[in-house]
Amino acid sequence: MNSPLDSRQLRAFRVLARTGSFTQTARELHLTQSGISHSMKALEGEIGCRLLDRLGKKVVLTQAGEQLLQHAEKILLEMAAARESLTQLGKWGRGRLRLGASTTACQHLIPPVLREFKESFPEHAISLEPGDTPELVAGLLQQRIDLALSLEVEREAQLEFHPLFTDELQFLVSASHPWARAGRVEREEIARQNYILYSKRSVTFRLIENYFRHEQMVLNAVIEVGSMEATKELVKLGLGVCILAPWIAKKEIEEGSLVALPLGRKKLSRRWGIIHWRGKRLNLAEETFIGLCDSACAPLRQAG
């Protein structure tokens, strides 16, 4: 395997190709003329062919030298770009933040947090990957994302959970539903309803399934929907009952198009938080993002 070319030799070669003079090259690079001469001989020895010809006092490139110059220009340009990008990364506020979040968090929690984050880190490059909790966990483990705003996960020893708030899942029905008019849910009617529930692959679906299994109930026909917004719209049309946290339907509940009712005597709670690699040393941007999430979720903690 050939050893890589010396960047200092390439830089001297490029200057010599431009000036055609060992003296001028040595002057520009603050080196001795003999130093430049030895450097070029070493470069020719490394490559294994003659790169330079002397025409009187002037130095010109051979055909091999012309080819090498094309490559040297590209190599040195890439090295300069790499150095500049690393320099910029070291400057205050420069860097990247790769986030993952559930679709619900992307819509209701992330926007105000990112708006504030950008005020402190205007030069930061931010990417946001939406997905359900299992997808976000995979993204963290594969190091595609740095932080995930999601539901708590179990049995992931490599990951650490920073809690933000706890919510409670409830029945959501249209204003015209009998439960809404009565203001309560009759236990014997629960299994007879049609349900519109979010993706069966989600942590939330599994929590709901386990909850009603413990209550010795099997929910009736379930329509699986991949969008929280579509779920709420179908419920508003009276096509079924959904089970969501009221904060996700705050607008609809306040305007009276949806009504939230408890699942039963026992609550079904979920914990939301930030997930990252266990033991990871968080940088300033990551710590700031988590702090902003803490502040943004304060009303939800108080409501809970």
Image (spheres, helix red, strand yellow):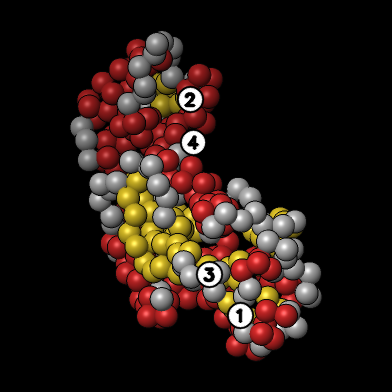
Query: Does residue 178 lie above or below 221 as drawn?
Result: below
The earlier-in-sequence mark between 2 and 3 is 2
- Residue at point 22% right, 35% down? 31
Mark 3 lies on a secondary structure that is loop
- Viewer-nearest residue: 8 or 202: 202
Identified by mark 1, the residue type is Arg
Identified by mark 2, the residue type is Leu
Q: Quadrant of the N terminus?
A: top left
Q: CA distance from mark 2 to mark 1?
A: 82 Å
Q: Nearer the viewer, mark 2 or mark 3?
A: 3
The residue labelled by disc 4 is 74
Q: Is residue 96 visible?
A: no
| Residues marked 4 and 3 touching at CB (< 8 Å) | no
- Residue at point 25% right, 46% down? 279
Q: CA distance from mark 1 to mark 4?
A: 73 Å
| Residues marked 2 and 1 touching at CB (< 8 Å) | no
The earlier-in-sequence mark between 2 and 1 is 2
The residue labelled by disc 2 is 68
The residue labelled by disc 3 is 264
| Residues marked 2 and 3 touching at CB (< 8 Å) | no
Identified by mark 3, the residue type is Gly
Mark 1 Cα within 10 Å, few/some/many (few <14, many 20+)? some
Q: CA distance from mark 2 to mark 4?
A: 10 Å
Q: CA distance from mark 1 to mark 3?
A: 10 Å
The residue labelled by disc 1 is 184
| Residues marked 1 and 3 touching at CB (< 8 Å) | no
